Amino acid sequence: RKEVEQDPGPFNVPEGATVAFNCTYSNSASQSFFWYRQDCRKEPKLLMSVYSSGNEDGRFTAQLNRASQYISLLIRDSKLSDSATYLCVVNPKAGTASKLTFGTGTRLQVTL
Amino acid sequence: NAGVTQTPKFRVLKTGQSMTLLCAQDMNHEYMYWYRQDPGMGLRLIHYSVGEGTTAKGEVPDGYNVSRLKKQNFLLGLESAAPSQTSVYFCASSYSRRSAAYEQYFGPGTRLTVT
């Protein structure tokens, strides 16, 4: 089983739609969780951290379910500019704060 | 601030040739990393460094060497390139914190093709 698993997509949604991505992780001791965004042929950039209480940043909401070991990202009112690959990222081991494990990414295409 | 920069941006090597990829950061970060990204594989950690003069192996270190002689620079070397090392290489840096991971800032990447 992969340490971090994501549905690769692509998710094709019309502008204005709400779309949700899920990600599962295998190590129950994982400490930190993130969503990164990667545009085509560009470097990954942090979108948001994921906290146990859930967090929201504008149109983006991230949730963590430790019991089921999954993380979700909800995007409301999708924009064309949201088209990108979204990477689920986990810090899998206690005491190794510097090392992150990246999922393979979920591709989102927002259309007119 | 330039953030994280990488040179070169593109390179084509022949099998057996050597090269060095340079990463530089101006954010005074302690930690630096080298990743490779291949289709369907996600980002995989090659080597990383938790401070000047220290390096450690990541998930896929074979065929690569690294050096961190200055805090702001992290070099990745390929001594004898192989076609399996065709990939996009990303350098990243972050602050250090023992209890949790900080955001990693990535460079723009180096696209390497080995023929």
Image (cartoon, rainbow, N blue to C red):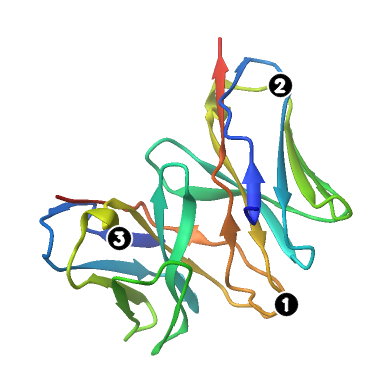
For mark 2, name the chain: A
Which residue is more in the foreground, A73 or B61?
A: B61
Q: Residue at x 14, y 68 (%)?
A: B18
Give the percent coordinates (x, y) of residue A86: 58, 40
Q: CA distance from mark 1 to mark 3?
A: 29 Å
Q: Is residue A85 left or right of residue B75?
A: right
Q: Mark 1 belongs to which amino acid?
A: Ser
Residue at (53% x, 27% y) in the render: A83
Q: Residue at x 58, y 73 (%)?
A: A98
Label 3 secondary element: strand
For marks 2 and 3, give the CA distance.
35 Å
* Residue tagged 2: A77
Give the residue type that dot 3 points to: Gln
- Label 3 marks which chain's residue? B
Looking at the picture, tell me which residue is in the foreground, B81 or B31.
B81
Q: Secondary structure at mark 1?
A: loop
Which quadrant of the structure image shows residue B23? Answer: bottom left
Residue lying farthest to the front in this orientation: A1
| Marks 1 & 2, CB-CB < 8 Å contact | no
Q: Which residue is mark 1?
A: B99
> Dot 3 corresponds to which residue?
B6
Residue at the location (33% across, 75% down)? B73
Query: Which tag is nearer the camera, tag 1 or tag 2?
Result: 1
Tell me how far mark 1 sits from mark 2, CA to CA. 35 Å
Q: Earlier in the sequence, mark 1 or mark 3?
A: 3
